[in-house]
Image: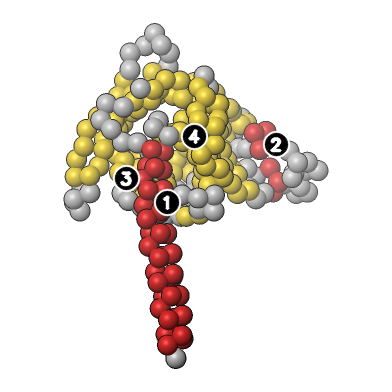
Amino acid sequence: MLRIIALFLFFSLFINACGERQTEEREPLAAEQYAYFPLEIGKYIVYQVDSIIYDFAPGGITRDSSRTLVREVVSDTLRDQTGQLLFTIERHERMSDAEPWRLKSINTAARTATQAVRTEDNFRFLKLVFPLSRRSVWDGNIWIDKNREIEIAGERMRPFINWRYEVDSIDIQAIVGPFVFDSTLLVTEADDTNIIERRLSRVRYAKNVGMVWREQWILDSQYCNQVPPPADCETRPWELKAEKGYILRQEILEFN
């Protein structure tokens, strides 16, 4: 009987010790990962943003290409109605280095022990969850109506259909523009295709910098709905058969 009690106590202590060790490891891991979403007043990043906007018009589909320089600056802090600390991020834009920066919008970002949240154009996104792993999956658009319509080049679209955030790689070296970052995080926010819709959104973060690269394809097409369907319906590249929406590529140029 004493032997059984002794064994029971041994296994109880072993289980408790394992539980305590896992708890001690979890918190430092998450804290280290906060560096992928740094928030500090005065920090800025300059991006080059290339976009193609598709406009379905009676005379045919037009593709409007543009290049914009974007400067995002963490400018201040405030508290929301719940007391959560928010960082305000000023977005400035210009078309070339010869032009002055013009303030276009003010967004907010926040980070808690388990979440990184960013609000853009009144849309609130759950950008990251902590701790992160190669198996992390979450609903980054949890506060957004999936069927919400927005207007792009005069056309109504539902850009947030079938998004599913997941980590592709973490703590991996990557070359982005002119920089080599030792530790980066790649997140696929959406990657869904059917015969009429293409939704792709991927983001790369670098430790102590933040977002350094992004690509989005929000495209709709009725090309395959012709009768009969074209022979190349499924093989025709989306950049050729798209009728409305946009393709966007954003890459870091400068940071402090």
Secondary structure at badge 2 equals loop
Residue 227 higher or lower than 10, as above or below: above
Q: Tag 2: Cα neighbours inside 10 Å, few (<14), some, or many (≥20)?
A: few
Which residue type does callout 2 highlight?
Pro
- Residue 95: image location, x then y, percent: 42, 16
Crowding at dot 4, Cα within 10 Å, few <14 / some 14-19 / many 20+, comes out as: some
Return the residue found at the far front: 2
Separation (CA) of disc 4 from disc 1: 16 Å
* Mark 4, residue position: 183
Q: Are marks 1 and 2 in contact (CB under 8 Å)?
A: no
Q: Position of residue 63 (x, y in %)?
A: 58, 27
Name the one closer to the observer, 66 or 76.
76
Q: Nearer the viewer, mark 2 or mark 3?
A: 3
Residue sitting at 46 percent across and 85 percent down?
3
Q: Label for residue 111? A: 3
Residue shown at the point (18%, 50%) measured from the top left: 83
Quarter that holds the C terminus: top left
Q: Is residue 188 visible?
A: no
The alpha-carbon separation of the residues under discs 1 and 2 comes to: 37 Å
**Marks 4 and 3, Cα distance to the nearest angstrom?**
20 Å
Nearer-N-terminus badge (4/2): 4
Q: Which mark is residue 237?
A: 2
